[in-house]
Image (spheres, grey):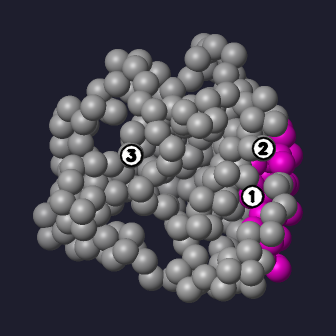
Amino acid sequence: MKLQRLLSLTRQAVDEFHMIEEGDKIAVGISGGKDSLTLLYALSYLQRFYPKHFTIEAITVHPGYEGFDLSPVQSLCDKLEVPYTIVHTQISEILFETRKESHPCALCAKLRKGAFNEKALELGCNKIAYAHHKNDVVETFMMSLIMEGRIYTFSPVTHLDRTGLTLIRPLIFVEEPDVKGFMKKYQLPVVKNPCPVDGYTQRQYMKELLANLNRDHHGALNRIFTAVMNGELPDWVMARTGGRLTGHTDKFEIR
């Protein structure tokens, strides 16, 4: 995928769901993975021509793992002229030494989000941006349907009432294979996840299930996404009409 296509899809999402207003300062969550670096690229270029002026701050929450080298991300931010902040934490120590968690993912996500939101507010941001893409939308929808028996997926825009921040997801029209293509074409400096329990998850299971479904029934993923778009889910309707959904966090953590 070329940059022009990425910007077109990003602007489509931003416009349709009223994600950006004049004067916004947006904190972009950078994990070091392909998705967040693609989002960084998209917003850094979008701000150069978007009719509503906005600024961005890149933020990475460092969990404290050894060998988590973020210097390539710093170099990319310098190239894109985006301010970059690394929040150093003791999350790994809390999880594996103090609490000795056997299933640390939920607590890790909560601690990382808390540290990210705190830094975003400290930097004067009023919005935060996550790099969830179209596949993430469909995977979450299917996980909710199959594992919980409810019709749900995260919203394009969510107001976090505890912090006053608004969470936006500008990549929801971008498919994961296109993100991978963009990563290769523009040689994004992806940093490997250092988490010692990083591995097979329920989300990975759903990703593989949908890949098989899409292979056997070509276009299935896009049809499910269209069903979400047309399904009158309250939070999606509110986002499209410029309303606001309040909440605290997402049910499923995107790894």
The image's mark for residue 154 is 3
What span is colored magenta in the figure?
58-85
Residue at coordinates 41% horizontally, 30% vertically from top-left?
A: 245
Element marked by disc 2: helix
Q: Amino acid at mark 1?
A: Val
- Residue at the location (39% across, 26% down)? 239
Do the residues under discs 2 and 1 have CB atoms within 8 angstroms? Answer: yes
Are there few (<14), some (14-19), or many (20+) residues within 10 Å of tag 3?
A: many
**Mark sitting earlier along the chain (2/1):** 1
In this figure, which residue is indicated by the disc labeled 1? 61
Whether residue 30 sits left or right of residue 34 in the image: it is right
Which of the two discs, 3 and 1, labels the residue nearer the N terminus? 1
Query: Is residue 46 shown above or below 155?
Result: above
In the rendered image, residue 66, in percent from the top left (x then y), is placed at: 82, 80
Q: Is residue 26 magenta?
A: no
Q: Amino acid at mark 3?
A: Phe
Mark 1, other Cα within 10 Å: few <14 / some 14–19 / many ≥20:
many
Which residue has dot 2 on it?
119
As drawn, 104 above or below 214: below
Using the image as rendered, state which of residue 94 and residue 220 is in the foreground.
94
Q: Looking at this view, is 49 or 154 the one in front?
A: 154
Spatial separation of the CA atoms under disc 3 and disc 1: 22 Å
* Local secondary structure at mark 3: loop
